Image (tube, grey):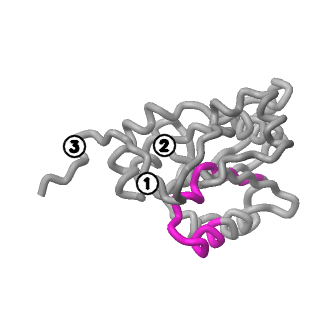
Amino acid sequence: VQRVYDCIARSWHGTRYKAWPRVEAFARALPRGSLIADVGAGNGKNLPACAETGVLGEPTGPSFPIASDLSFELARICAERGFQVAAADVTRLPFRTGAFDAVLCIAVLHHLSTRARRETACAECCRLLTPGGRAVFYAWAQEQEPSAGAARALSRTDDAADGGYSGHRFPTQDVLVPFHVPLRCVDMS
């Protein structure tokens, strides 16, 4: 996973530019001055929502987002955008226990190859939280049918276009999603 994302980082960055609406709402609802870990931050698309305004649009003052990603190239993009970032594995995060008011773990868990690694990653994210801290996890799932309540909620929002229910049925759990890799990343040896 790291090698692939290191290869496609610049191209991938051009296709991921804003937080999903529910992630943004979560981040903006946090109290002023919150310390937020964005674990598996990719290019940092969620970080601006963590640092701007409150849920009603009022200035909240600075929250302090800190990113981490396994891909050195994606971590470099976060740093170039002016964010604090560490290149780190989600199963062994380099942050102090109980240091963060909130943790974002968006589109990360489905990249981990085993249930044990996914459970370790969730435990690591929770380890970072202060008592009473909050976390949000998003992961791709084979089961793409929402509950009746979720279907009603999605019909009232535009979330489906930004990471919500697509209605597509996937025949297997492992699906290769095509991404056109720049030629410079292809090993010709």
With 30 as the anchor, is 4 left or right in this view? left
Q: Residues within 10 Å of mark 3 (few under 14, many from 20)?
A: few
Give the residue at x 45% y 36%: 13
Q: CA distance from mark 2 to mark 3?
A: 23 Å
In this rendering, which labeled residue sits more in front, label 1 or label 2? 1
In this rendering, which labeled residue sits more in front, label 2 or label 3? 3
Q: x, y percentage for residue 189?
A: 12, 58
Amino acid at dot 1: Ser
Q: Secondary structure at mark 1?
A: loop
Q: How many marks?
A: 3
- Which residue is label 1 attached to? 71
Q: Using the image, determine if residue 145 lies above or below residue 82.
A: below
> Considering only order in the chain, which callout, 2 or 1, is on the residue closer to the N terminus?
1
Q: Secondary structure at mark 3?
A: helix
- Which residue is label 3 attached to? 184
Q: Using the image, determine if residue 185 lies above or below residue 111.
A: above
Q: Is residue 182 magenta?
A: no
Give the residue at x 73% y 61%: 99
Give the residue at x 82% y 57%: 133
> Considering only order in the chain, which callout, 3 or 1, is on the residue closer to the N terminus?
1
Number of the label disc, if any, that sits on residue 79: 2
Q: Residues within 10 Å of mark 2 (few under 14, many from 20)?
A: some
